[in-house]
Structures are given as structure tokens and as C-alpha cells.
Image (cartoon, helix red, strand yellow):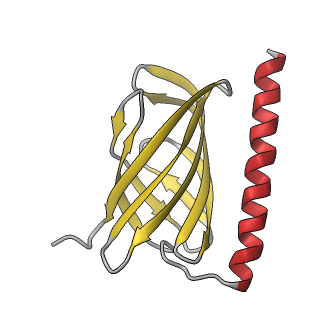
């Protein structure tokens, strides 16, 4: 049990450092590519392929429709990084508390988003993932 708490603590510290540095850089550089947009994404994980809507709020909030949780994101130039936390989430056949850390970009001038990240289930099981998708409402 101590190992799970240590992994959760170290992951939280790493995420905070990345986000603080990204937020500082955003204040000096910041182009808002994903701000206020919703994307239909395909998350490719070893557990399953899921296709939620990912909404990047105007004030830095992040929502993933497949999981009832809370998240945030920050932009730096055409890149973004985000974190998401959901209790009792299900991915494939596994269920538990979920921490999702992602980094990605948009492909200008197309309404396409791509990226990668990790999913941590129950604060101990780590799974890599890749994602891609398109802006909701942009495809005719």
C-alpha cells in the first residue's frame, strides 16, 4: 500500500511541475489552439479503444465524456498538456480510480488533434495511450 501512495505522490508532483512550467510559458508565449473546442477522439490503450468527446473549456477546464471526473489543461504554442481525474472509472475490463495525463497538438489548418499520454488506474497500474480525433462540428 505504501508503494501505491508513493507512486501517486510522485505522479502528482511531476504533473504539478509540468503544469506550472507550462502555465508560466503560456503567459509569455500562448497561442490558444484548443481553447473552447470539443473534439471527438479515439484513445488507443492496451485495455480498450474508447471514443469520448473531449472538451477544452474557455477557462482551462477539461471534460472527457467517457469518465465522470474533473480535469484541466494549458496551452503552449500549438501544444497542450492536461490532466484528468475520475473516481470509479472503467477502461476495458478494469475499473478503479483513474488519473490521465496527456500531451498533444492540433494539426493546422485541419481540425485534427493527436497526442499521447498515460492512464494510471488505482494509482498503481500504468498504461500508455495514443489518441487522435477531429473537432466536433468541423466535419461536414
In the image, 58 versus 91, the foreground residue is 91
Q: In the image, residue 54 lies at what x, y percent?
A: 43, 56
In the displayed structure image, the side of residue 34 where residue 123 appears, left or right: right
Which residue: 80% across, 20% down?
3
In the displayed structure image, the side of residue 23 where residue 49 appears, left or right: left
Q: In the image, residue 122 lies at what x, y percent?
A: 64, 25
In the displayed structure image, the side of residue 85 where residue 50 appears, left or right: left
Which residue: 51% across, 37% down?
128
Q: Is residue 5 above or below residue 107?
A: above
Figure quadrant of the C terminus: bottom left
Figure quadrant of the N terminus: top right
In the image, 50 versus 67, the foreground residue is 50
| Total tally of numbered discs in the picture | 0
Q: In the image, residue 100 lies at what x, y percent?
A: 58, 43
Which residue: 26% across, 70% down?
137
Q: Is residue 123 above or below residue 110?
A: above
Give the quadrant of residue 75: bottom right
Q: In the image, residue 78 lies at what x, y percent?
A: 52, 74
Give the quadrant of residue 58: bottom right
Which residue: 63% across, 82% down?
30
Residue, far top: 1
Q: Is residue 72 above or below residue 7?
A: below
Amino acid at each position: 500500500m505504501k508503494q501505491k501512495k508513493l507512486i501517486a505522490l510522485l505522479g502528482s508532483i511531476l504533473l504539478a511541475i509540468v503544469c506550472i512550467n507550462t502555465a508560466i510559458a503560456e503567459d509569455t508565449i500562448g497561442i490558444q489552439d484548443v481553447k473552447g473546442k470539443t473534439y471527438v477522439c479515439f484513445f488507443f490503450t492496451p485495455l480498450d479503444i474508447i471514443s469520448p468527446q473531449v472538451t477544452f473549456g474557455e477557462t482551462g477546464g477539461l471534460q472527457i465524456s467517457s469518465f465522470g471526473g474533473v480535469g484541466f489543461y494549458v496551452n503552449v504554442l500549438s501544444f497542450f498538456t492536461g490532466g484528468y481525474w475520475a473516481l470509479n472509472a472503467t477502461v476495458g475490463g478494469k475499473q478503479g480510480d483513474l488519473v490521465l495525463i496527456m500531451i498533444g497538438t492540433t494539426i493546422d489548418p485541419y481540425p485534427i488533434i493527436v497526442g499521447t499520454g498515460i492512464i494510471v488506474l488505482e494509482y498503481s497500474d500504468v498504461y500508455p495511450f495514443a489518441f487522435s480525433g477531429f473537432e466536433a462540428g468541423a466535419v461536414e
